[in-house]
Image (cartoon, rainbow, N blue to C red):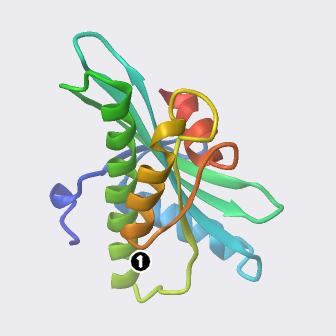
Amino acid sequence: MSDNTLLFFNEFKSPTHGPLDFERVLEKLFEYIGLEPGLEYELIIGTDSMPGANATADFVSAIVVHRKNRGGIYFWSKRSEGKLHTLRQRIFQEAMFSLRLAEQLIERLKEKNIIDFRLTIHVDVGPNGKTKQMVHEIVGMIKGNGFAVKTKPESYGASSVADRHT
């Protein structure tokens, strides 16, 4: 998959590094971990959305590299989608984008023979508010695809990092 035209997510931005393609995101991710290789890291994927006009929505998906107890860096990608008329459709699309980005990232890590990592998907649903009826479905979908998942209030990858750019 070394051809960037085949990537679903390829255009990213970083507050630290500016605009990057997916290959440069990986380089910066490895560079960041390489600065302090003995520490514990977690990879986090999260997506948030904002409804737009005419049943469209803007989606921001983020890759967060969390250096436990020492901060982290993140990269984000934004896209617009149409034909999303309800909150339920938007929330499911957020989860699908997170799954797709997680699979893209894991595939590339495996190509580089990196198999020892912790990846968690953060979803923007929780026990309170309008999304509480969807928690079990969204969590089940993420777990059913083999990923660890966190919901609000612990899902800062979606509800804080990605939300910052929607």
Residue at 48% over, 38% down: 133
User: How many residues crowd around disc 1 within 10 Å: few (fewer than 14), some, or many (20 or more)?
Assistant: some
Residue at 43% over, 60% down: 140
Residue 98 spot, x, y in % from top left: 40, 52
Q: Is residue 159 above or below residue 95?
A: above
Residue 62 spot, x, y in % from top left: 49, 47
Q: Is residue 126 above or below residue 145?
A: above
Residue at 62% over, 48% down: 155
Badge 1 amino acid: Leu
Residue at 28% over, 10% down: 53
Work out which quarter of the rendered image holds the N terminus and state it. Answer: bottom left
Q: Quadrant of residue 43?
A: bottom right
In front here: 125 or 51? 125
Name the secondary structure under disc 1: helix
Does residue 15 show up?
no
Residue 156 spot, x, y in % from top left: 65, 45
Q: Is residue 150 above or below residue 56?
A: below
Q: Is residue 114 above or below residue 149?
A: below
Q: Quadrant of residue 128?
A: top right
Image check: 98 left or right of 70?
Answer: left
The residue at the far top in this view is 53
Determine which residue is flagged by label 1: 109
